[in-house]
Amino acid sequence: MALLLVVSLVAAFVGFKIYTSNYYAADEKEIEEVRDLVGDKAISFTDETGTVFIPSGQDTRAVIIFYPGGKVEFSAYSSLMYELAAKGYVCVIPKMPDNLAFLGVDVIDDIRRKYAEEMTIVGDVDWYLAGHSLGGVAAGRYLAENAGNANGGFKGLILCASYPADDLSGTNLRMLSIRGSNDGVLKADKYEESRGFWPSNSTEKVIDGGIHSYFGSYGIQAGDGTPTISNQEQIEITASLIDEWISGN
């Protein structure tokens, strides 16, 4: 019986590793094009914990921590982060274990502890937790788990093609939900069911012609819809919607 249990555990572990090894890699060419467009308005630094994007030559307006989608390379969201940094936001994309945010829901706590001194440089600004797809679900879980602890220091939640699977309706959080009209991956029934979990101060935006995959730069994932706008256009629209939402309050 013990041997059977060990064999089962090993088989499950191997199967999980095979599953997570097949992930969507970042489209470096697409990211480089966006980096060139923002020019000297933003700079980035990468270490073993992830990548930080910093506005250049302007004051920090807010901090955005972005949880990557499931089985998507974290750097695939660099395009969106460059666009946001160019608008004055300090952005952080944490590396997630096996490219799954659910395995690192609390990773932001580790980053804040490790870089406590560096974090003081941003000053007294609002912090927002964000995420794409399953990364957004993980971000919502973090906020739900820290609802009694001043929401973990976050003012709001930004979801890209995602929804909260945990109840945030009783919190004082702000929430922005952005999705593409041609999304073929986001489960419409789950999204609609989640509305009961939304904070009372929630805003929804739909990008006409946008798809699930184009919130990052990693190509088009299996099952997604057909876009009528480019990847770069959706990234730019998303960054503008986030900027307008944060700036409007």
Image (cartoon, helix red, strand yellow):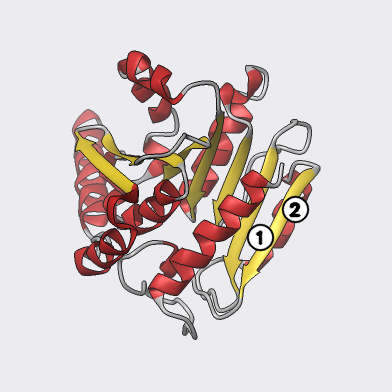
Closest to the observer, 75 or 141: 75
Q: Secondary structure at mark 1?
A: helix
Where residue 144 sits, quadrant-wise, is: top right
Residue 87 in percent (x, y) is at 47, 49
Residue 7 in percent (x, y) is at 19, 40
Q: Is residue 242 above or below residue 51?
A: below
Residue 218 lies left or right of residue 119; in this view the side is left
Residue 50 in percent (x, y) is at 27, 37
Residue 189 lies left or right of residue 114; in this view the side is right
- Tell me the number on the disc at residue 89: none
Where residue 224 sits, quadrant-wise, is: bottom left
Residue 110 visible in this rendered orientation of the protein: yes
Closest to the observer, 84 or 102: 84
Query: How far apart are labels 1 and 2 at the CA level?
Result: 7 Å
Closest to the observer, 200 or 184: 200
- The residue shown at (54%, 74%) is 183
Which image quarter holds the C terminus? top right
Residue 142 lies left or right of residue 175; in this view the side is left
Q: Are marks 1 and 2 in contact (CB under 8 Å)?
A: yes
Residue tagged 1: 191
Which residue type carries mark 2? Arg
Residue tagged 2: 195
